Image (cartoon, grey):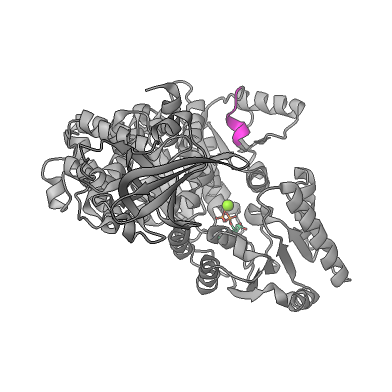
Amino acid sequence: MGPALAARLEKLGVRSVGDLVLLLPLRYEDRTRVAPLGGLRPGMRVTVEGEILHVEVVRRRRPMLLAALGDTTGSLTLRFFHFTQRQKASLVRGARLRCFGEVRAGPAGPEMVHPEYRLVEPDRPAPPEETLTPIYPGTEGLHPGRLRQLVRQALSALGGNLPDLLPPGTAESLALPPMNEALRAIHRPAAGTDPDTLASHRHPARRRLAMEELLAHQLSLRRLRHRARRARAWALSGGDLVERFLDTLPFALTGAQERVVAEIRSDLAQEAPMMRLVQGDVGSGKTVVGAAAALQAVSAGCQAVVMAPTELLAEQHMSNFSAWLEPLGVEVAWLAGSTRAAARRETLARLASGAAAVAVGTHALFQEGVEFHRLALAIIDEQHRFGVHQRLALTEKGSADDRRPHQLVMTATPIPRTLAMASYADLDASVIDELPPGRGTVRTVVMSDARRAEVVERIRNACGNGRQAYWVCPLVEESEQLEAEAAEKTATLLAEALPGLRVGLVHGRLRPRQKEQVMAAFKAGELDLLVATTVIEVGVDVPRASLMIIENAERMGLAQLHQLRGRVGRGSEDATCLLMYHPPLSETARARLAAMRETSDGFEIARRDLELRGPGEVLGTRQTGLLAMRVADLVRDQGLMPDVRRLADRLLDEDQDAVDALIRRWVGEGDRYGRV
Ligand code: ADP
Ligand code: MG
């Protein structure tokens, strides 16, 4: 195979013969019968055969080749808008052709545009296809027929003999076919099989493949965890910083926070590196839990690092951590992409010497040149925006003296349990499933933007009563600049409509310092209304803000709306969230807005979000590659997970060779994301 073809296949994720047979057809076509030309109707997708009666090249702006095909019942025009000289030479009067394509109504009766075709010898009639014809996902420059041929070759090269890697008896007990049978059913389905049933993910052959794939990923993550856990970490105990910290807090931990703090505490006291995921809804108080963990490291004479995916979120942590830790005599250093050279040098020196015990920042924290004195704990917020790779890179960072840092991953995207089992099999999970007491409730109202004037009135009333409000401007995917300009315009219009109110503006184009000033002013009550782009999603915590307006809410995802709404109702007062949409609403948008109105439970929101848009987007895995599955779909196939976990346990105990082979078959060489 030449490099050009190889490159095209690579786009489909195909790097080996084995990959080819794991490529699933999107659908099937029935080419097992040849249709008589006399019975063709527009819209039919059929195989036909006939003799070329007449060929001509019509000169329009570009030459076009027309061929008339005939059999005893009628005729059909074949139309080619582009063609090679070789094609032209073979499509001659008297040649017999077998074609497949969609019939459409042409100016002179039925025609096919660019049918798939091949020449057949007149005296040796070729039998029609024996099996249904699989249609694989296409890619530019790769002819569907060629791809089909490659898969067929791959199947026969493997001799119908792909080893069954599941423990004996497993497939039967799950009522799934053996691997070879599954592959045959998928790639060479017998004539007469119903193509729709076959293309459905519920088909046993597909479930068999999905099962194996989920298993392979599970094994790969578990092995990764196993390797990482074999490393040594600092056993963190001693000192009284954690107690002193908890004593200074103006509130008591919730039961859920206490439970999670205790889980982390006992993990950190071990020499095996902790690998723990803390899930907790917006506002459930994850930061305090992270701070307690960091202090346990500092108390034991080590360092901790806190990393967030955006500078704004990191700043929020910085202000919390320095407010909490510095009174206890713990130095907190700041490092982000925007940190100036001199300040950066100073920070690097203080981290390397150990003078700064805690570092807060963005991924700038694990770039070249950042050295720690004794890094014992890495806290990563909003995990779903970081890939497994980045997480591992960070862990490697700390491997001084043969010790790895413990890992604490915090996420506000509540991930349903089965999904978490599949995607975070390398982590233990803790859940903060309780909000701090005394929070008001948030009422959610959905309304058309035709009622904008009413909304402005509501702001006037709320702010007149000493409350504060957020106005969130629409997301402009293409350009932060356009988004910022739109927000500026909205702020100006609202300021005109609401004289007497103090209106602030924050968007992604402001410098971090400017953003911080506006946020701080809003927090201090010096502003009544804050117009913002979605940057506040992960932003400030303002207890007096009790009204939020989200413009063009129909364009946002559920998880994002939920995060935004979490910005109000943080005080004791009841709050309102107005979701304004621009009609007409699509089905999905309608379902999303209804979900927002009906529930404020993050886990329920996550469940519906998955239903509405699939897991890749929720977890941001398009970028990370973590869940890039070929056959399986984590949401659809989540019912398989209990069996997958059980099988993984068994294989890891009994059959390392099968584990290796499964990972190689599905995840690829070097575990792809699993390189530690
Ligand atoms: P998130 O889990 O969304 O990161 P935060 O850690 O930002 O939530 O906490 C939200 C707010 O709740 C903060 O103002 C925090 O100080 C406060 N908070 C956290 N825990 C408690 C508690 N047990 N009681 C009262 N308030 C708390
Ligand atoms: Mg948080």
* Viewer-nearest residue: 230 or 40: 40
Q: Depth check: give the residue in front, 143 or 269.
A: 143
Residue beneath the point at 54% across and 69% down: 596
Residue 641 appears at what percent x and percent y?
29, 51
Give the position of the N terminus as an image quadrant: top left
x then y, percent, for residue 557: 56, 59
Q: Is residue 279 magenta?
A: no
Against 82, is 69 above or below? Answer: below
For the stretch drawn in magenta, the main secondary structure is: helix
Which residue lies at the image location 43% right of the left edge and 35% below the top edge?
A: 142
Spot occupied by residue 89 in the image (x, y as percentages of width and height): 42, 30
**Is residue 310 left or right of 284 when viewed as pictured?**
right
Nearest to the observer: residue 339 or residue 404: 339
> Relative to 437, is 54 above or below?
above
Q: Quadrant of the C terminus?
A: top left
85 or 510, which is in the foreground? 85
Q: Is residue 325 left or right of residue 641?
A: right
| 562 lies left or right of 666 | right
The segment highlighted magenta reads 363-368
Where's ligand 1: which quadrant?
A: bottom right
Q: Is residue 212 above or below residue 11?
A: below
One can see residue 594 in this view = yes
Location of residue 419 in the rendering, given as x and y in whole percent from the top left corner: 38, 52
Q: Which quadrant holds residue 225?
A: top left
Residue at screen point 74% across, 79% down: 454
- Number of dots carrying numbers: 0
Residue 240 in sight from this viewpoint: no
Above or below, 339 relative to 640: above
